[in-house]
Image: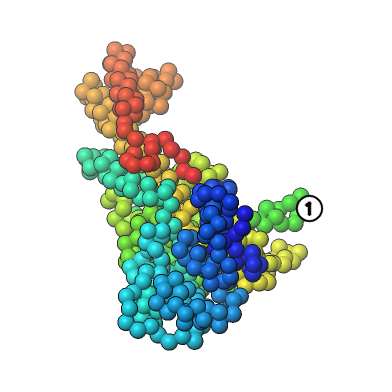
Amino acid sequence: MQSVGLAALIEEMRLRVPPPAVRSEIVSGSRRTLTAGRTIIEQYPKRYEANGVTENLRFALRYEPVDLVTLKAIFLAVPRTELEAWVRREPTSMYSRRIWYLYEELTGKTLDVPDLGRIGFADLLDPATHLTSAPIRVRRQRINDNLLGSRAYCPVIRRTRELEDAMASGLDRDARALTQNCEPGLLARAGHFLYTQETKSSFAIEGESPSTGRADRFVRALLDGASFDPSNTQALVQLQNSIVDARYAAQGWRSVQNYVSRTRSDYTQQVYYICPKPGDVPELMNAWSRSLTRMRESRIDPVSAAAAAAFGFVFIHPFEDGNGRIHRYLVHNVLARAGYTPDGLLFPVSAVMLRNRAAYDEVLARFSNRILPLIDYEMDDQGRMTVTNETIDLYRYWDATPYAEYLYGCIAETIRRELREEIGFLRLFDRAVNATMNIVDMPDRRASLLVRLIIQNEGRLANNRRNDFAELTDEELGRIELTVQSELACREAERCSQEPLSGGLKRGSEPR
């Protein structure tokens, strides 16, 4: 085997960069695709062999997804004159023009090459391979810049088979189909449950049980999700202040080096994640917010945009406290602003993350595992960390694809379980309460309490609660219990007959 494309240049130049999501190899044999862990290995026959910087860059742009952090490292390592010579030889080639534009965009330096004349514009990213934004025309290289961000911050989202299937599955239509025939009162009650569940689950992931005031503030923030502007720094600070203990309320971005670790038995720290340097946070957050705006204005697939926004935020970790809850809040914010969720409802993704905590932890660890070996740091005996090398590009340019795939799985699960189950339960409950009040003309609240107790005890009122309803005869109570049992049986039959979710996301699937 012989590496080709970006992998060949990484090895040849001994670059310290995260491994590319796609690794290309030249082999004796036919074209095929393999996987090794989370890495996709594309194998090509010998006629695809490439030698030198120019040929391997051309191969990478033609056959591999764009990897900005690797490309920038290559640009800083290769003599500028070599790229200038390539552009002069092939000034109208789409590959030399893309490299020319990316070099100047990522490094901030200018190649000694004159502007192109009047030729057609070429897309920077191939829309068949990547999710792309509305293009910005660059006349110097005659390039359509359709990145999801800028040189200061730019995630990349690849069009994998899994993501394509998810985007085509119509989960938003599934959610609306579940709610379109609901009475307003029932829908409001379902919404209250979902907002409350999301709040409790989001705090539980952090190991917290919030006070009533903090929980209410978080619910109010979720309710206002469609109007919240995450590009407003002060709005983010105020959101952080509302959901953390007042003693840890931020005045702005953090000013200390954060990291995630576990204390060993000898009291040293086993480090799992290192956040960006505090001095890098303002630049990253300003560019992060501009990327959000660009994706929203370009109408990028809402779930993919939500994943890029939310996970990008938590990787930057701009506050000392509250980052995880805001990260999950941003999922709802982006989906609500895009009109992806039904009015008055949300998809309580934190409940899925909490229920399958291992999958959530694993998807977070994927980012850390890629960058941690590339960060040099020192730690004093007080546990204070100092990062000693330049690391900002590790957080600027990252592959958001697995996070979009994961978030789609979470949303599919919330529609199947939380939304469908809650609406189904409320309909069952209302039918049982109405039937109960037809048997005995009793106050609504008392009938609701009786039905709830019978449901909780699997169709019968517990003996120790019988005296609470002493006014009912045994015959009346028996008829009410039979009515509730009948509704429970109907609900179970409905569950068994329900169709899977649309497209490739099937009922009962777990998030990756």
- Outermost residue on the right side: it is 266
Horizontally, is 260 left or right of 431 in the view?
Answer: right
Residue 16, picture quadrant: bottom right
The residue singled out by tag 1 in the image is 266
Residue 111 location (% of width, % of height): 49, 84
Left or right: residue 120 compared with residue 39: left
Residue at image point 44% right, 66% down: 236
Image coordinates for residue 425, horizontal then vertical, percent: 33, 33
User: Toward the viewer: 63 or 407?
Assistant: 63
Q: Residue furthest top?
A: 475
Image quadrant assignment for residue 294:
bottom left
Identify the image quadrant of the N terminus.
Answer: bottom right
- Residue shown at 42% from the left, 49% from the top: 161
Residue with the most extreme front position: 47
Q: Is residue 278 left or right of residue 290?
A: right
The scheme the figure's colours follow is rainbow
Amino acid type at image mark 1: Asp
Q: Nearer the viewer, residue 445 or 384?
A: 384
> SS class of the residue under badge 1?
loop
Q: Is residue 268 above or below residue 468?
A: below
| Residue at 24% in and 21% down | 440
Mark 1 Cα-neighbour bin, 10 Å: few <14, some 14–19, many ≥20: few
The x, y position of residue 349, in whole percent, is 43, 47
Q: Is residue 506 visible?
A: yes
Q: Is residue 28 above or below residue 395?
A: above
In-front residue for pair 138/321: 138
Question: What residue is at 33 percent from the left and 48 percent from the top?
Answer: 168
| Rendered view: 470 above or below 411 | above
